[in-house]
Structure formats: C-alpha cells, structure tokens
Amino acid sequence: MESTKFTCKHGSTEILNNPNYHSWKRSLKAFLIAEDAFGIVTGVETPPNAGITAQLGNFCRHSGRAYSLIYASSDETTRSLINNLPNEEPNHVWTALRLAFDTSASMLASLTTVHHFQKTTMKLGTSVTAYISVLKDIRQPLAGSQEPISDKVLIGHLLSTLPDMFATIAGIIENKPAAELTLDAVTTTLIDDKASMALRNDKVGSKLNIAGTTTQALAATIRHRSKRRGHGSYRGRKPYE
C-alpha cells in the first residue's frame, strides 16, 4: 500500500495529492527554506554563470535537493505528471503543480498565458527556430495543467502568424495528413523552406550583379566605338570645311 506520509530531517507532511495541495505546499515551503532552496523553486534564484564554478556547484546541489523533496513527497499520480513535464527543473515543477492543483491560480494563470500566446506573432528579423522557441516558452507554464497548449494548437498558431513570405509553404503544410503534422516535422519543413528562400535570393542577387556588370561593360564598349567613329569622320577634312 502506498504511504500517505512523507518524512525528512525537517519534519513530515502528507503525501501530495490533489485535495491536500495547500497544506502540502505550506509544509514543503518550510522544508525548502531549511534547505536554502525556496528561491530556486520560485524562480527568484537563477543559475549563476557557467564560469563561476563554486556558485554553480552550490546552486546545482540545492536545486537537486529541491527536486528530491518535491518528487519524494508526491503520490504516484503526481509523479507521473512530473515525469511527463518537458522541463523538470524545480521551478518548472513547482509552477506546474500549482497550475494543476490550485484551482483559482490555475484559472487566472491559464487565461493570462493563453492570451499572451494568442497575441504573440513573429517579429521582423526573428528566425523560425527562435519564434517556435518563444511559443514553447510561453506555453510551458501550462504543461501538466488541465488545459495545456497542445502541439496541435501551437502548430495552428505558428502557421497563422508567419510572415507572408511563408504563405506558400504554410498552405502546403496545412494540407498534409494529420499524422505528418508533428511539431518537429513542421519545424524542419519551415527551416528547410527558409534556407531554400535564402539560396534563391542569393542566386537572384548574383544574376542581377552579373547583368549589371554586363550592361556597364556593353555601355562602355558602345561609348568607345562611338568615339572612334566620331574621330574617323573628321579625318582628312580641312578646317571649317
């Protein structure tokens, strides 16, 4: 039988399940503060620069303890939710659990996140890869909640907010079988199409340069021949003739 109690050196609490989220959160907050890791799960404390070895090592140790406390004090259903998160960093897990179990916070955060997601468009000069990464980051807080932003929704938003230069390829993607419309496949297709556009533009630019050079050379030749003919027409003539 699964235990209903979690005990550590800082105290004990009921194993997290949906109904007892708020009491579990209060206990875990105390445990995390004792481990100097509460700032990590709330996102206040972020990883130091990779070059600062001592600080980075300290952060990783506290981050590991934070994850261990959260995971070990959760029931099997909650652990399954954590295991399926795209990012298992302690602050992402903490946020996902809040959205999954705190009804009032979940509703407000969900509406805010969805609104932000729907208003996001691809900015001028942004690469396809960077734009998709932005959309993934925006939907991240809803992962594991009751209403996550699925890959299907992300793909639909992505295709509808791409610049006009992607209109042709977006239409082709939209008409593909549903089984082929995975986020990875769509991302690869868009990246390949952008690379093809860049190659075509380079070729067009080269042709224009060649054409411009040829035109200039031809104009120079015509001017040179005109001068020669002009000089020849006056040969042998007397002044004022």
Image (cartoon, rainbow, N blue to C red):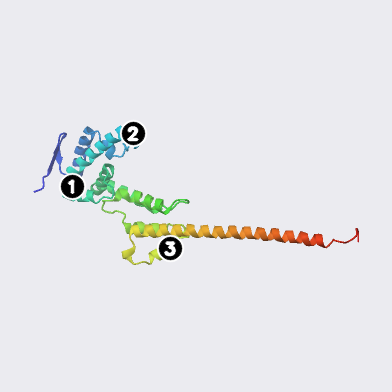
Q: Which residue is mark 3?
A: 169
Mark 1 crowdedness (10 Å alpha carbons): few <14, some 14-19, many ≥20:
few
Q: Amino acid at mark 1?
A: Pro
- The spot of residue 241 in percent (x, y) is 91, 61
Mark 1 to mark 3 CA distance (whole Å)? 48 Å
Classify mark 3: residues with Cα within 10 Å, few (<14), some (14-19) or many (20+): some
Q: Nearer the viewer, residue 227 or 186?
A: 227
Q: Which residue is painted at 69% across and 60% down in the image?
A: 219
Q: Nearer the viewer, residue 85 or 145?
A: 85
Residue that badge 1 annotates: 19
Q: Amino acid at mark 3?
A: Ile
Instruction: Find the distance from the CA under tag 3 to the CA under tag 2.
Output: 45 Å
Residue 56 pos. (x, y %)? 30, 35
**Is residue 164 visible to the viewer in this orientation of the structure?**
no
Disc 1 or 3, which lies upstream in sequence? 1
Element under disc 3: helix
Q: Residue at point 25% right, 43% down?
A: 94
The residue wearing badge 2 is: 52
Asked if residue 71 shows in the view, the reply is yes
Q: Is residue 88 left or right of residue 164?
A: left
